[in-house]
Amino acid sequence: MFLLIFSLLLASPAAAAADNAAGPKSIFLLAGQSNMSGRGGVVNDTWDGVVPPQCRPDPMILRLNAALTWEEAREALHRDIDAEKTCGVGPGMPFAHLARRRDPGIGVIGLVPCAIGGTNISEWRRGGRLYGQLMARAQAAVLGGGGLIRAVLWYQGESDTTSHEDARLYKRRLERLFNDIRSDLLSPVLPVIQVALASGSGPYVDVIRKAQLELEIPNLRCVDAKGLDLEPDGLHLSTRAQVRLGHMLADAFLGITAPLPVQSSSGHRRCNNFFLDLFLRWIR
Ligand SMILES: *[C@@H]1O[C@H](CO)[C@@H](O)[C@H](O)[C@H]1NC(C)=O
Ligand SMILES: *[C@@H]1O[C@H](CO)[C@@H](O)[C@H](O)[C@H]1NC(C)=O
Ligand SMILES: *[C@@H]1O[C@H](CO)[C@@H](O)[C@H](O)[C@H]1NC(C)=O
C-alpha cells in the first residue's frame, strides 16, 4: 500500500495518470459551522432536496466521505459528517464547479467536508476533537490518491457572538487556528478563504466580523456574507445564497493562485508550479 502511495507521488506522466484515476488532484478542506456544512433548502428540519445546476454532481468533483473513501460528490455534501443535523446545500459544490470552469488545470477536485453545526472556535483548537478530525481527514485525503491540499475554506463565528470574552479573543484564536493548520499540514502559506458573518444571534456580531475582516496573514482572503439571503429561520443561508457564496469563495481562491508569467529561456510561459507561484507572489 505504501509503495503504491509512494509511486503515485512520483511525478512521472504514468504516475500522473494513475494519480487521476485514484483520487483528486486538487484538495479543499471545508470547515466551520452550519453555513459551511450547508442548510440551504432546509426548513423545519427537512431538506427540500432541490439541487440547482451549479451544485449538480460531476465525475470531476469528488468528496471524501465519513469512511475516508473518495466518491462522486453530491449534495448534501456534509450529510455523513455533520450527521446529527439535517444538512442541505452548502458552498462546496458551486465553489468546485466555478473553480474548474475558470481553471481547467485544477484537475479533479476533492472536497473534504469537516464542518459541524453549532461549534465555537474553542472547540476547533489544536488538541481538540474537531481539529483532530480535520487533520485526520486531511491526511487521508492526501494519502488516498496523491493530490495536493490547495486551500482551507472556513465559515464560522456565530457561536462566538454570545459572550464578550469569546468575541474579544476571537481574532487571536482565529489566527492561531490558521497558523496551526498550516504548520501541521507542512504548508506554511496554504491559502485560507474565510467568510465574514453578516449577522448573528448574539450581541457581539460586530466584534467577530471586525476580527474576520481585519485579520491579515499571507494568503488569507475574506469574503463577506453581507447581503446574502437567509432561510425563513433567519439563521442560515438559503440555497441561492450558498451558490453565490461558493462563487465568491472560488473567485477569492483563484485571485490568490492565478499563475504568474515567468521568464524562461524559451520566452514567457505560464508558471505551473503552485508553490513557486506562491513564493513569487510572496516576494514581490
Ligand atoms: C414550518 O413550521 C412552521 C411552524 O410549525 C409552520 O408555520 C410552517 O408552515 C412550516 N413550514 C414548512 C415549509 O413546512
Ligand atoms: C464552546 O462550546 C462548548 C460545547 O458546546 C462549550 O462547552 C464551551 O463552553 C464553549 N466554549 C466557549 C469558550 O464558549
Ligand atoms: C449563517 O450566515 C449568516 C450570514 O452571515 C449569519 O447571519 C448567520 O448567523 C449564520 N448562521 C450560523 C448558524 O452560523
Image (cartoon, helix red, strand yellow):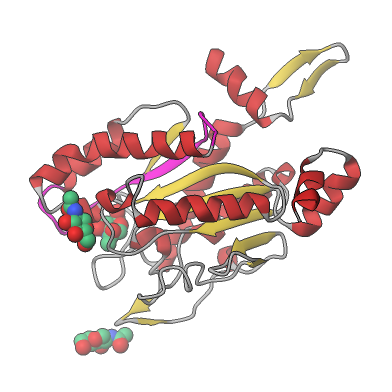
- Place residue 208 in its image quadrant: top left
Can residue 200 be seen?
no
Left or right placement of residue 146 versus residue 119 in this view: right
- Place residue 82 in its image quadrant: bottom left
Q: Verify whether residue 199 appears in magenta.
A: yes
Residue sitting at x 27%, y 63%: 118
Give the number of callouts.
Answer: 0
Can residue 219 be seen?
yes
Of 11 and 52, the residue lying toward us: 11
Left or right placement of residue 213 versus residue 64 in this view: left
Q: Verify whether residue 198 appears in magenta.
A: yes
Residue sitting at x 41%, y 74%: 83
Left or right placement of residue 102 versus residue 94 in this view: right
SS assignment for the magenta stretch, majority: loop
Quadrant holding the C terminus: top right
Of 95 and 179, the residue lying toward us: 179
Q: Position of residue 6 (x, y in %)?
A: 77, 45
Q: Position of residue 258 (x, y in %)?
A: 62, 32
- In this rendering, the answer to whether 188 lies above or below 89 is above
Quadrant holding the N terminus: bottom right
Query: In the rendered structure, which segment of residues is drawn in magenta?
Result: 186-204
Q: Position of residue 28 (x, y in %)?
A: 56, 49
Q: In the image, ligand 3 is in what quadrant? A: bottom left
Residue sitting at x 88%, y 15%: 266
Extreme-front residue of the structure: 2
Q: Position of residue 159 (x, y in %)?
A: 22, 56
Of 278 and 242, the residue lying toward us: 278
